[in-house]
Amino acid sequence: MSTALWILTIVFIGLLMFGVPVSFCIGIGTLLALFTVTPTVDAALIVSAQRIASSLDSFTLVAIPLFILAGSIMNTGGIAARLIDLAKVLVGWMPGSLAQITVVANALFGAISGSAVASAAAVGSVMSPLQRKAGYNMPICAAANVAASPCGLLIPPSGALIVYSLISGGTPVDVLFVAGYIPGILMALSVMIWLWIVAMRGDLPREVHRYSMGESMTIFLRALPALAMIVIVMGGIVAGIFTATEAAGVAAFYTFVLGKFFYRSLSWQTLARSILDASVGTAVVMLMVGVSMTMSWLLASTGSVQAIANAIIAISDNPYTLLLMFNVLMLLLGTFLDITPGLLIFTPIFLPVAVKLGISPVHFGIIIVFNLCIGIATPPVGSTLFVAARVSRVSLTELTRPLLPMFAFEIAALMLVTYIPALSLWLPEVLLGKVS
């Protein structure tokens, strides 16, 4: 390991242990490591500033604030309630229906908003009072909300996949988007299967909620404009009408029109608040992207990435063994890192190893995002964990225990996605005619 890598690692871990935000841990560690490869302190500061600025000069990155804005408008524009009503129609007939509805609603809303935290908050705040009134086991219901909320980070449009596209050196965003559908659905199904088992053994009520054909059509028509955004955005990308960045602009404009003029649930005050929230969220993500890209450049320029890759391959050159090791490592590290810093830190390190072993960058991207999706729902720092506990009014201790079997089923789904590449690569090949 080079001196720069040692300094970066020690400073990063040390600052992280003292509770310093991850972006500052990376930025300070990278700057101090730069002192070892530049002739002067001034040169290190100039190189750091230049790398941060150049890494943010990307047309692809423009999609992130626009998708964040679209998700923020949806969260305040009354769209979540309509999607939850649709979820009631789709899975209200299943045992433990109110818990199952939570999972499907998270998949629908998360796919549109692209935010696990917003999804957990919106769905949990609507469903928790209904579940409590119906006598449901609230820790199980809250756990289902936590486990299902990251599904939307795999089901496009996904900001996480945009970040991976950038950091991986240009893996096509449209291919990544299409590749995320089946793994995202598998993630949701894994939670639903466990809830079915729990309901059948009597830990959740078995009564179902059925709707007449007329009621179902009314609910579907009310939710159709919100669902149409997925068709417009993904249809436009797949058909080659616009890029992912242009699709983000379409999504932001469409959600504004939908909330303001169609549903009439978006006031100018809530729009201003949505813009402010989106601005803050964008600033956080962009700072993380800037310092992480600088770190990646430093590791590459000092040969550290190649050294790490050689060390990993020296352990085993069997891709199945290395994928298992990678999954275990990412599941452990994901308990301490959010999805964006996780992608920015580990993609430059592990992607070259994966490519060297013949693993598709698209397949690897889905694997790493799937891992980190599970990670953001796990203690001690899972962001969705605290949101779901608050809106469901259950303690973290009560919430954690029923989460464990749900994680086991999600990890089983992760293993399927890891070792059956077709689950990620078949759909892009069919719809786009390409997988990279």
Image (cartoon, helix red, strand yellow):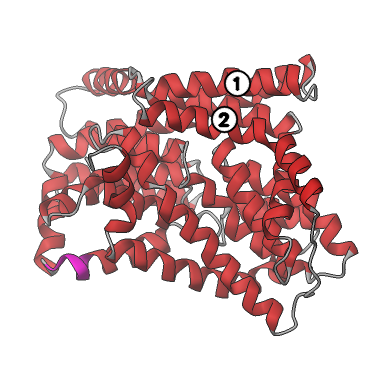
- The main secondary structure of the magenta stretch is helix
429 versus 204 height, above or below? above
Tag 2–tag 1 contact (CB < 8 Å): yes
Q: Is residue 33 visible?
A: no
In the image, 385 versus 294, the foreground residue is 385
Residue of label 2:
229
At 36% from the left and 68% from the top, the residue drawn is 415
Is 37 on the left or on the right of 56, as rendered? Answer: left
Whether residue 94 is in magenta: the answer is: no
Dot 2 or dot 1, earlier in sequence: 2
Residue 90 lies left or right of residue 333; in this view the side is right
Q: Name the residue furthest right.
A: 133
Mark 2: amino acid: Met
The answer to which of 147 and 173 lies nearer the viewer is 173
Q: Residue at x 23, y 51 (%)?
A: 350
Task: From the top left corner, tell me how far across and down residue 150 is, in percent.
Answer: 54, 51
Q: Residue at x 63, y 24 (%)?
A: 255
- Foreground pick, 36 / 256: 256
* Range drawn in magenta: 318-322
Q: Is residue 403 above or below residue 21?
A: below
Q: Using the rendered view, name the quadrant where residue 138 is placed.
A: bottom right
Task: Find disc 1 in the rendering and name its residue.
Answer: 254
Residue 164 in sight from this viewpoint: yes
**Badge 2 element:** helix
Q: Residues within 10 Å of mark 1 (few under 14, many from 20)?
A: some
